[in-house]
Amino acid sequence: MIKKWTMILFKRRVLLALLILIQFAIIGLIVNQSIATSLVWETIFTLLSIGVALHVVWKKGKEAYKITWILQVLIFPIYGTLFYIIFNRQTQTKKLQRKLETIYALHRSYLLDDFTVLEEAKNAHPEQGRLMHYLTHTAGFPVYDQTDVTYYAIGETYFEAMLDEMRRAKRYIFFEFFIVADGTMWDQMLEVMERKAKEGVEVRVMYDDIGSFTKLDPNTKQRLIDKGIDCRIYNPFHPVLTSSQNNRDHRKVLSIDGVTAFTGGMNISDEYINEINRFGHWKDNGIKMSGKGAWGLTLIFLQLWQTMDDHLSDEAIRRLLPPVIENYLENSAAGYVQPFSDSPTDTENIGENVLIKLIYAAKESIDIYTPYLILDENLETALILAAESGVKIRIVTPKQWDKYLVHVTTRSYYNELVDAGVQIYEYTKGFMHAKTVLADGEVAVVGTINFDYRSLYLHFENGVLLYGNRVLKEIETDINETIKMSEEMTEEDLSYSLPVRLVKSLLRLFAPLM
C-alpha cells in the first residue's frame, strides 16, 4: 500500500499540482510578512490595488469580467490584485496570436472558397446572408456547397461512424480532441490509427493537456511516436501561474483525407458512448461532412497544429489538399455548410457573434442544446428579446450535473428567461452534453461551443453552420424526442427561498471565472 501511494505521489500530474499549491503558499507568506512588518509595503499594495481597479475599468473587454475582477480587488485588495496581475500576463497569448495571424495568412490561399457559392447561398437563404457575409469576409471562413452531411443523435453511432471512416483512410488522419481518456473508445481508435500508420497513412494526434490530464497515461505521446504517429499535446500544463493556462483547446475535429470530417460535442472517453455510467445516460451528438466542407474543418485542425511548427510553408498545406471534387452531389438540395472556429487570443468573439446573429435572425423558433447556461448580458438580452418578440425558444440543459457550482449558476439564469417566455427543459435521463442551435428549422450550428464564458471567451472552439441541409429535419426530430425525456422548468419549480436566491446571485457575480 505504501509503495502504491508513493508512486501516485510522484506522478507528473500530482507533482505539478503540488508545485502550484506551493506557489500560492509562498506568495501568501511573502505578502503577509511584508504587510505585517512594513507600512511602506502596505501603502504600495493599496496603491497597486487602486491602479488595477482603474486599469480594469479602462481596459476594453466584457463588462461582466470587469465587474468580477473589480469585486475581487475591492473585497480582497491584496490577493485580488496579485491574482489579477498573475493571471493577466499576456506575453504568451500575444505571441500565440502573432503566430496564428501568420497561419491564417498562409491558409487564405487554400480555403477553396468560391464567392459564387456565397452569393448562391445568400439568395437561397437571404435571412442568413448577413451571417454568411460576416463569417466569410470578417472571420475568413467560406461557405461550401457539394457537401453531404450526416447527423448522429447519440454518441454510440457517432463513434462507429468515426471508426468506419478511419478504416477507409488513404492519405491521412487528423485527430484533435479536448479530452482523450484511457478506455474502450480510445483503445479502438488507437488500434485503427496504429494499423493505418503501418500502411503508410499519415496520422496526427493532438489533445489538450488539461482536458486529458488525469485521464490519459502520461506516456501516451511517446507511445504514439514509437508507433509512427505524430503527436502533439496542446498547451502543456506547467506549474507556473499564468493566464495562458486558461486558453484550452476545446475543439473536436477528425479529418480523413480532407474529404470527410467530423465534429460535435463528443470527446474520446467511455462515458460519451455510455460504455460507463458517470452521470446517468450521456446525451451527445455530432455530424459528418463528406465533400468540400470537410476541407474547412481540416484547415481548422491545422490552425493549432501549426502553432507548434518551427517553420511554415505553402508546401505543407499544398500536399494535404483533397482531390478536386466535381459534382460531388447531383443537386444542391443538400444545402450549404460553413465551418468556423474561434480563438481567445484575438478581439473577435466569433462564437458568440454567430449565436447572437442566429437568435436575432430567427422568425419562428430557436432550439438549443447546451450543458451549461452561463450567459453574458449580450446573449441573455438576445434570448429575452427574441422570446418577448414572439419567437418560440426551447433550451435543453442537463438535470444531472457534472460540476455542482456550474449547475447551480446555470439554474440562476432560469427565472429571467422563463419570465420572458423561454421554455427551459432539463434532460432527466442523465447528462446533456450536446452543443447545438436550430433556428426556424432552416439553419443550425453543431459544434463544441457551450453557452458559457469559458467557451465564448477563453477556449479554442469550432462549429459548423448548416443552411437548408437535409439533416435539419433530423436535428429537429431529435430535439423533439429529447424534450419528451426532459422536465420543463416552471415558475413553481423556480420559487427559491431567500438564502438560495442570495447564493445564486453571488455565484452569478463570479460566473465569468467558472
Image (cartoon, rainbow, N blue to C red):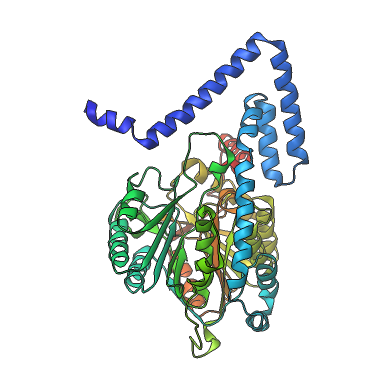
Q: Position of residue 434 (x, y in %)?
A: 47, 60
- Please name the residue shown 69% across and 53% down the image: 347
Q: Position of residue 496 (x, y in %)?
A: 56, 42
Q: Nearer the viewer, residue 327 or 502?
A: 327
Q: Where is 135 relative to 305, above or below? A: below
**Which of the image's four quarters has the N terminus?**
top left
Name which quarter of the figure residue 495 lies in: top right
Q: Position of residue 328 (x, y in %)?
A: 48, 86
**Quick one: which residue is furthest to the left in this view?**
1
Q: Position of residue 208 (x, y in %)?
A: 45, 50
Q: Nearer the viewer, residue 450 or 259?
A: 259
> How many marks are shown on the rendered structure?
0
**Quick one: which residue is furthest to the bottom in this view?**
330
Q: Where is 112 relative to 39, above or below? A: below
Q: Where is 490 relative to 12, above or below? A: below
**Which of the image's four quarters has the C terminus?**
top right
Q: Is residue 429 visible?
A: no
Q: Nearer the viewer, residue 335 or 289?
A: 289
Q: Where is 227 relative to 85, above or below? A: below
Q: Nearer the viewer, residue 463 or 254?
A: 254
Q: Is residue 115 visible?
A: yes
- Please name the residue shown 60% across and 56% down the image: 100
**Quick one: which residue is furthest to the top in this view?**
37
